[in-house]
Image (cartoon, coloured by chain):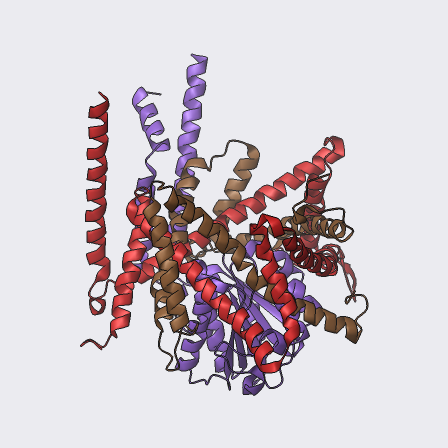
């Protein structure tokens, strides 16, 4: 190898990371500004959540625990919008809550906004219970006596005065619960302390980081479906036939993934060349 | 007890105890709060470089608490409009936290380029699996090679599931053993004791 | 309301959100005062937010109202246990905190045992120990469908995966012969799973970036007064000035030393 080749390889291997930053920024920005809307394939785990929601009758009790904070908003918030839209479209009784203190405002905002869009009334069609500390203790307590855990909704109305909570005394009265989680507490806790003990159907939505860890539960039927990350949210939007932020972000997701694939391949090509060069020098 | 003997009395005990845990959980915030205040008060008192930022932290905290009290702890008022507290949450806290974590996108890309090298056969396997996953779980990947989605799905459902399951079982057995040690008083580290 | 229909609070909010987002992104250049300002604001606001929510959710709704309006004075016990946690900051009464910790840890340990055995051990084992062949009306069959997670071939692979990974982790004896083969299989499974985890981590992080860029694009609109462009230019100028000042300070320090 010529010395110039060696210097190019070592330069590429030690390139200033800020060039990579610019590349990632462009790979995100350009597709967001010029989307080509590539087709999205629906995975069985997302379809399972959708199909279960479809199978529920009008008036079924749907509990959505929005267990995520602002750090995970881009991934999980679109899932919350889609699930709430679906539940309201099917005229279900919707109960919103969160186990994550810093997510309270977002959870309140999403349920209030979607409900208003769909003409639903607080207390009659839906309620937002707010946040309680204690994670597993909250789920256990709700399984024992929901009114004990949440004597009032988030706005201070006693829950026994809410029409939507009329026949909901414990978690056993919930027809379908979905935890939208970004870590602890989340789907694991809802299964371990909730579904496994109080026997209600449970689905999940999560950040992509968490999703692989939930597949044993999915395989074992402990959760009946899983919406994983922005991709999962995009699939749900497609199933609902309502394009939102998740579908809009899929082209950028594709572009950034491919930039990283190219970077990983390039890095390994340069690494292999540099190893060959070193071996060549040792021989000489 | 309640699990093995689901008598109304043990049920009532679990109901009360879990409610008590929620209340105690609320007070746990004090622990973190005091530690944070101690750390930043020290920085201010000692005039450590950048102590002014600790002042900013206290000011932000104070403003948020006052705004919260004025809003009665509500993000939205009765007209479903944002309160001052809700406004600060939506336009300051949400973007700040979101952006802070989105920085990781840049660093994960940089780490992938710098550290993701096939030095051994095992590392090569990890690398191929990661590439297949990144390829197969985005629309462009499935568009270019439809089968990539199926491969990614299989890895998740079978290989990944079995590994995660083994880890889940292993960690759970460890936690069960620890809990038994706590109940029988063998493990007392949580009380601030020393290892015997 | 402004002429273009945007309420003033939304307009100011757009400018604040954009500015703070850009402050944090300046870290990509390197650590600097704008980032530090954003970082400390974030911690302060988050803590303030959590204090208020906790006071209202627990202090008011679970303690004050039930006690004062419904006479449930027995709730003083958990309140006291909660307060006793803070005794650990006062050495003379620090022992009081042990009572609270004992209750919390005891409750956790007691509830977790049956739950973990049922949810994470038995249920997981039950799904792992599935029949490796399928019995149908026409006799035994072997389903080879890789896409069906419950097919016989996938059940078999899952069994091998779970056993080999558990073996690799649990049997800390030197892996030789058959043991080595099982442990090697476990490592292969682990590597593929780590690869999958990395792929999904990339997916997650990129989604967060997409979300923030989405907002920056939205706030670049004329209806908001294009805060993204204006504040980006301003941030770059401030950052450039800070870099210039740093270099000046560095130069003068070097000169002083020489």
Left or right position of B1 against C76: right
Looking at the rendered image, the quarter that the N terminus of chain A falls into is top left
Position of C173 relative to B134 (above/below): above
Identified at 70% across, 44% down, the residue is C166
Left or right position of C136 against B193: right
Identified at 60% across, 86% down, the residue is A166
Residue C235 on image: x %, y %: 23, 51
Residue A60 on image: x %, y %: 59, 82
Position of C177 relative to C25 (above/below): above
> What letter labels the chain drawn in purple?
A
Residue extending farthest to the front is C92
Which image quadrant is residue C45 in? bottom left
Which residue occupies the foreground of this view, C156 or C141?
C156
Looking at the rendered image, the quarter that the C terminus of chain A falls into is top left
Identified at 35% across, 57% down, the residue is B59
Q: Which shade is chain B?
A: brown
Residue extending farthest to the top is A284
Left or right position of C237 against B135: left
Which residue occupies the foreground of this view, B64 or B87?
B64
Which residue occupies the foreground of this view, C171 or C176?
C171
For the image, the number of numbered tags is 0
Position of C64 relative to C130 (above/below): below
Residue A221 on image: x %, y %: 66, 64
Residue C138 on image: x %, y %: 78, 64
Q: Is residue B147 visible?
A: no
Which residue occupies the foreground of this view, C162 or B27?
B27
Position of C190 relative to A236 (above/below): above
Left or right position of C38 against C235: right
> What letter labels the chain drawn in red?
C
Identified at 42% across, 85% down, the residue is A119
């Amino acid at each position: 190898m010529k010395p110039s080749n060696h210097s190019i390889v070592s330069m590429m291997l030690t390139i200033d990371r800020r060039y990579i930053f610019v590349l990632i920024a462009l790979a995100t920005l350009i597709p967001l500004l010029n989307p080509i809307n590539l087709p999205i394939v629906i995975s069985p785990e997302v379809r399972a959540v959708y199909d279960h929601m479809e199978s529920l009758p009008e008036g079924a009790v749907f509990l959505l625990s929005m267990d995520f904070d602002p750090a995970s908003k881009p991934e999980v918030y679109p899932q919350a919008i889609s699930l709430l839209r679906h539940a309201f479209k099917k005229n279900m009784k919707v109960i919103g809550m969160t186990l994550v203190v810093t997510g309270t405002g977002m959870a309140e905002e999403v349920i209030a906004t979607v409900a208003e869009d769909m003409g639903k009334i607080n207390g009659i069609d839906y309620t937002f219970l707010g946040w309680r500390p204690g994670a597993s203790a909250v789920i256990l307590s709700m399984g024992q006596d929901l009114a004990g855990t949440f004597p009032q909704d988030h706005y201070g109305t006693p829950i026994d005065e809410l029409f939507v909570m009329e026949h909901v005394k414990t978690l056993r009265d919930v027809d379908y619960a979905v935890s939208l989680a970004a870590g602890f507490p989340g789907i694991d806790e809802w299964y371990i302390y909730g579904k496994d003990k109080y026997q209600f159907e449970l689905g999940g939505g999560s950040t992509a980081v968490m999703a692989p860890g939930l597949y044993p539960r999915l395989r074992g039927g402990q959760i009946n479906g899983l919406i994983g990350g922005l991709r999962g949210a995009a699939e749900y939007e497609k199933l609902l036939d309502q394009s939102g932020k998740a579908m809009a972000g899929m082209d950028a997701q594709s572009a950034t993934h491919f930039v990283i694939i190219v970077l990983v391949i390039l890095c390994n090509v340069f690494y292999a060349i540099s190893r060959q060069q070193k071996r060549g020098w040792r021989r000489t | 007890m309640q699990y093995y003997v689901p008598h109304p009395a043990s049920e009532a005990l679990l109901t009360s105890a879990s409610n008590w845990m929620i209340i105690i959980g609320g007070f746990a915030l004090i622990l973190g709060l005091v530690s944070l205040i101690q750390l930043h008060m020290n920085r201010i008192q000692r005039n450590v470089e950048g102590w002014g930022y600790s002042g900013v932290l206290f000011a932000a905290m104070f403003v948020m608490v006052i705004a919260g009290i004025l809003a009665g702890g509500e993000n939205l008022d009765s007209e479903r409009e944002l309160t001052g507290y809700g406004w600060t949450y939506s336009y300051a806290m949400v973007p700040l936290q979101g952006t802070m974590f989105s920085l990781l996108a840049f660093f994960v890309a940089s780490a992938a380029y710098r550290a993701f090298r096939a030095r051994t056969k095992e590392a090569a396997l990890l690398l191929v699996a990661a590439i297949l996953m990144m390829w197969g779980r985005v629309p462009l990947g499935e568009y270019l090679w439809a089968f990539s989605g199926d491969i990614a799905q299989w890895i998740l459902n079978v290989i990944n599931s079995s590994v995660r399951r083994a880890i889940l079982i292993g960690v759970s057995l460890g936690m069960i053993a620890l809990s038994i040690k706590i109940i029988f008083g063998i493990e007392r580290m949580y009380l601030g004791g020393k290892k015997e | 309301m402004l002429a273009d229909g945007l309420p003033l609070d939304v307009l100011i909010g757009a400018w604040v959100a954009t500015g703070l987002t850009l402050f944090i992104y300046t870290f990509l250049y390197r650590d600097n005062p704008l980032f530090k300002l954003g970082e400390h604001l974030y911690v302060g606001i988050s803590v303030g937010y959590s204090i208020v929510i906790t006071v209202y959710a627990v202090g008011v709704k679970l303690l004050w109202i039930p006690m004062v309006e419904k006479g449930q004075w027995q709730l003083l016990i958990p309140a006291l246990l909660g307060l006793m946690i803070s005794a650990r900051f006062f050495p003379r009464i620090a022992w009081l905190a042990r009572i609270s910790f004992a209750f919390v840890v005891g409750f956790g340990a007691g509830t977790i045992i049956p739950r973990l055995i049922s949810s994470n051990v038995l249920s997981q084992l039950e799904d792992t120990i599935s029949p490796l062949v399928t019995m149908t009306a026409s006799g035994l069959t072997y389903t080879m469908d890789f896409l069906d997670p419950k097919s016989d071939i996938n059940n078999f692979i899952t069994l091998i995966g779970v056993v080999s990974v558990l073996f690799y982790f649990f049997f800390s004896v030197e892996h030789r012969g058959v043991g080595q083969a099982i442990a090697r299989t476990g490592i292969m499974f682990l590597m593929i799973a780590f690869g999958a985890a990395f792929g999904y981590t990339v997916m997650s992080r990129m989604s967060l970036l997409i979300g923030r860029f989405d907002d920056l694009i939205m706030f670049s609109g004329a209806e908001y007064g294009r805060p993204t462009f204006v504040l980006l230019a301003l941030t770059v100028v401030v950052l450039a000035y800070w870099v210039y000042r740093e270099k000046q300070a560095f130069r003068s320090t070097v000169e002083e030393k020489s």
